[in-house]
Image (tube, rainbow, N blue to C red):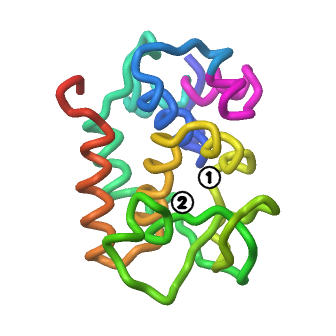
Amino acid sequence: MKAHNGMRPHDLLVLLKIISSKDNWLNKDLSTSLYISSSEISESLNRSMIAKLISPDKRKVFKNALFEFIRFGLSYVFPVVPGAVVRGMPTAHSAPVLNKDFISNDVYVWPSPNGNARGQAITPLHSNQVKAAEQDQKLYDMLALVDTVRVGRVRETEKALELLKNYFDWGHA
């Protein structure tokens, strides 16, 4: 077994895509839909297995463990500081999944020339994350909720975690 050299930000993207896909996925599907090479998908799944975030057969995400990682560790392991104002795709509390729950002058976006909003840049977990999120609404929502945990205040974070539980479909955990 390979040594675990720590999680990488896009490992979270891979795990969320698996949750979004339910049980209907192959490595090549993840590679295509996330715009990540097949070898990097394989390495990501290995890191997640060693971290006990996915089963040894790499087919079932341990949702409770992933949720606890997001809740307690994400903002320490993959912190983010909002950057310059740019055009992009809304994220965190600015994304459609949360923007009706919070009134804020702060707008956060993943930089993208095709974006429909202007706001402070939030570095995505992976450079092709915007393209992947444009193709999968559930993935987009979960990534925006994760960004809320990374950058949000307590009230926003609590709401994001509550909604994330619904996306994790606990009946099948």
> As drawn, is 51 to the left or to the right of 78?
left
Compared to 13, does 19 lie above or below?
above
> As drawn, is 69 to the left or to the right of 132?
left
Q: Are marks 1 and 2 in contact (CB under 8 Å)?
A: yes
Secondary structure, magenta segment, majority class: helix
Q: Quadrant of the C terminus?
A: top left
Name the amino acid type tagged 2.
Answer: Phe
Q: Quadrant of residue 81?
A: bottom right
Residue for point 63% across, 38% down: 135
Q: Quadrant of the N terminus?
A: top right
Residue for point 30% across, 34% down: 63
Horizontal and vertical percent position of residue 130: 68, 50
> As drawn, is 128 to the left or to the right of 161?
right
Q: Is residue 130 magenta?
A: no
Q: Nearer the viewer, residue 6 or 82?
A: 82
Name the amino acid type tagged 1.
Answer: Leu
Identify the residue position indicated by label 2 in the image. Answer: 78
Disc 2 crowd, CA 10 A, few/some/many (<14, 14-19, 20+): some
Compared to 142, does 88 lie above or below?
below
Q: Nearer the viewer, residue 57 or 169?
A: 169
Q: Quadrant of residue 155?
A: bottom left
Identify the residue position indicated by label 1 in the image. Answer: 125
Q: Is residue 40 magenta?
A: yes
Element on which disc 1 rests: loop
* Residues rendered magenta in the picture: 30-45
Could you tell me how far apart the alpha carbons at marks 1 and 2 are, in whole angstroms? 8 Å
Residue for point 54% across, 60% down: 78
Horizontal and vertical percent position of residue 138: 46, 40
